[in-house]
Amino acid sequence: MSYFLAGDLGGTKAILALYATTGQGYALVKEQRFASSDYDGLFGIIADFLAGSEQYPQIAAFGVAGPVAGGRVRMTNLGWHLDQEILREQFQFTEVILLNDLVAVAQAVSTLASEDLLVVNAGTSVLQGNRAVLAPGTGLGEAYLCWDGTGYTAYASEGGHVDFAPTSEIEQGLLSFLREEYAHVSYELICSGKGIPNIYRYLTAGAGMKVPKALQAALDAAPDITQVLMAQALEKEGAVARLSMEIFFSVLAAEAGNMALKFLSTGGLYLGGGLLPRLFPLFDAKKFMERFVSKGRMAGILATVPVRIITTDRAGLNGAALSAFRRLKTDD
């Protein structure tokens, strides 16, 4: 029996899990969640997780929120610098694999059960067609999968950082407002956990919408204003919060459509990330698809693309585990 370590490292939380190989594949031994802000790097998290453990992993694989190149990565929203060779030496692993976090999610797409997916558009899946994954969380992650002859291979993308392209007057105002603060306005600055507050600030400070006193008090006291805005959007007097969420979903749908076209994802487009499950009460599938397909002559193609929301928060961890297990089998 062999053991391996897998991790899903995001800007807000880190999940680590220890697995044991079995005759049928592998099984979970231990899992633990950590607040990323409590640590100044991955070393401390791994050390705390493995402390006192009788089983020690041979191989480790981590899905990391940032662009991985040459076995190194600087995590986009934390600033941590990770090097797989240094981690291997520090913990005496035989190998460490660093994956972009969305590549890890993409790796898991083919293994997801029906109960882990919410159908937004049934579409018509093309056998062995390309697939795309778009995930709003702390940031906005993107990845894609192509058929390699025997299975799907996942590839990284930093598409969440491309230029935001407004398609309405209110979005044009949002772009102009954010340009006063940011040298570069990307989709991530709107379609993410930090993006929703940006939209709210535009509507109030930029467009002059009034905020009820009770809402302002709640926002001033909240460590996470997205949660407050989501709750307020469901109330009768929540016009500002409701419009913030409508703009968020509209821009997200537009970028999802862009991605489906760029990768011609006839095998399906998957929406992941930790943010969407929190926003389900405000999600309107019909409006989302109207914006998704609104690409002129390409509308007919996009209408056939299957669109699913990944409802489990374990996809990134599962993808990292699958990568570690496959490497372990190859080495054996």
Image (tube, helix red, strand yellow):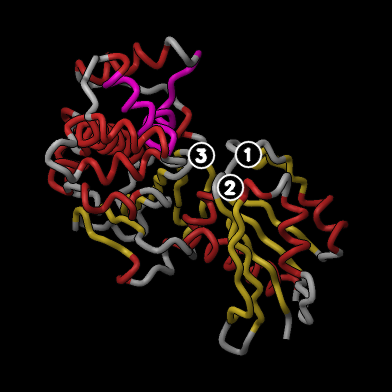
Q: CA distance from mark 3 to mark 2?
A: 9 Å
Mark 1 or 2: the one toward you: 1
Type of amino acid at the residue the image marks with label 2: Asn
Q: Residue at x 43, y 10 (%)?
A: 180
Q: CA distance from mark 1 to mark 3?
A: 19 Å
Residue 156 visible? The answer is yes
- Place residue 326 in its image quadrant: bottom right
Mark 1–mark 2 contact, CB under 8 Å?
no
Type of amino acid at the residue the image marks with label 1: Leu
Instruction: Provide residue 138's location: percent of width, then percent of height.
Output: 48, 42
Q: Which residue is mark 2?
A: 100
Q: Which residue is mark 3?
A: 157
Q: Residue at x 64, y 76 (%)?
A: 19
Question: Most extreme residue toward the bottom, as rendered?
Answer: 23
Q: Which residue is mark 1?
A: 78
Instruction: Provide residue 256's location: percent of width, then percent of height.
Output: 31, 39
Which residue is at the front of the view, 324 or 315? 315
Which residue is at the front of the view, 98 or 148? 98
Q: Is residue 312 above or below residue 194?
A: below
Instruction: Provide residue 317's location: percent of width, then percent of height.
Output: 55, 62
